[in-house]
Amino acid sequence: MKNIYSNIFKFNRNILKKTARYLKKKHLVALPTETVYGLAGNAYSDKSVAKIFRLKNRPKFNPLIIHYYDLKRAEKDVFINDELIKLYKKLSPGPITFVVSKKKNSKLSSIATANLKTVAIRFPSNKIIRRLLKELTFPLAIPSANKSGRLSPVDSIDVVEEFNNKIKIIIDGGRSKFGVESTVVNLTENFSILRYGAISKNIISKILKKKYSTLRGSKKILSPGNLKKHYSPGIPLILNQKKNIKGQAFLVFGKKYKNSKHTFNLSKKSNLKQAAQNLYKTLRKIKKLNYKRIYVAKIPNTGIGEAINDRLKRAAN
Ligand code: TXA
Ligand code: MG
């Protein structure tokens, strides 16, 4: 089936081969993952990775997540420790990213890792990206497919909105399953959460049988990309609101809110997973409707709600 956008493709064997060739030639492609859509390049190639930073207008100090098919392939580039094995067995492939130590003889582009001694690695579960990773002889550096600081895309049209025709191959895989990015955990020292995400900190804590520490209180910048201002829809957000201000957009969660023209409910069923799926799409929609501000009601801070609140806080900054 032809799409109205000539750079969006449905996935099939032909497009798989074409995409693989394209990546080998150091071009970039956009593709679905189970969290959000990503902008992918060959992680062993400085040239590919430099293109990613340029296109996203991403600061050079902010390293990319390296996506692998499986742990065996990752072992060429990073040291595997016990905690990684435990989490990998339970949660991978899936929406979790591990920060581990880089091997000296790793072929990873030092631009991708922002010259750090650590690397963030992830094993995505989305079927399309897994088919592609399996086919390739190199891992993929993949940030979210948006301009630096903006909302992450959750379908192929969002990617076109960010980059127009600058990306020649965008693979369509429908709406992202989780709708927020992967959880980033640091496994190089005491286990800590560097970015809240699709997998809650309690699940990780249970598997490791350990308490986590969070970034707060730590002076060292452990995760360079954890910028205070991020995930911005481009208009001001005002958090923890009880009711709406006339004519402004009101972003809410749950049964107790009545439908109205200006009310945008992330989940009428009070389901946090559904709210996460709808988050970025709803913020984009509100912006497009030309509202000047978004008033945001309180959203429960449990499970994936941690990630929703984290993103809203940064968007409000
Ligand atoms: O769900 C996801 O993780 C998506 C999909 C496309 O896989 N990717 C994504 O990438 O969110 P990006 O580039 O938007 O965010 C990567 C995060 C940043 O906060 C970055 O600072 C952090 O991972 N990161 C990367 N390498 C790191 C490292 N060595 N140490 C600490 N944080 C690191
Ligand atoms: Mg991002």
Image (tube, grey):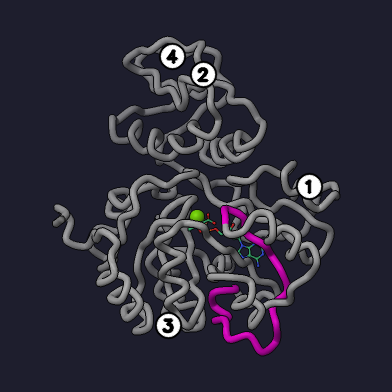
Depth order, front residue of 108/234: 108
Residue marked by disc 1:
205
Magenta-highlighted residues: 94-113
Relative height, residue 163 to residue 235 (above, below): below
- Which residue lies at the image location 66% right of the left edge and 89% below the top edge? 105
| Marks 3 and 4 in Cβ contact (< 8 Å) | no
Amino acid type shown at disc 2: Gly
Residue marked by disc 3:
47
Residue marked by disc 4:
245
| Marks 1 and 2 in Cβ contact (< 8 Å) | no
Drawn side of residue 111 relative to residue 135, left or right: right
Alpha carbon separation for disc pair 4 and 1 = 40 Å
When asked about the image quadrant of residue 73, the answer is bottom right
- Which circle's residue, 4 or 1, is located before the other in the chain? 1
Amino acid type shown at disc 1: Ser
Alpha carbon separation for disc pair 3 and 4 = 49 Å
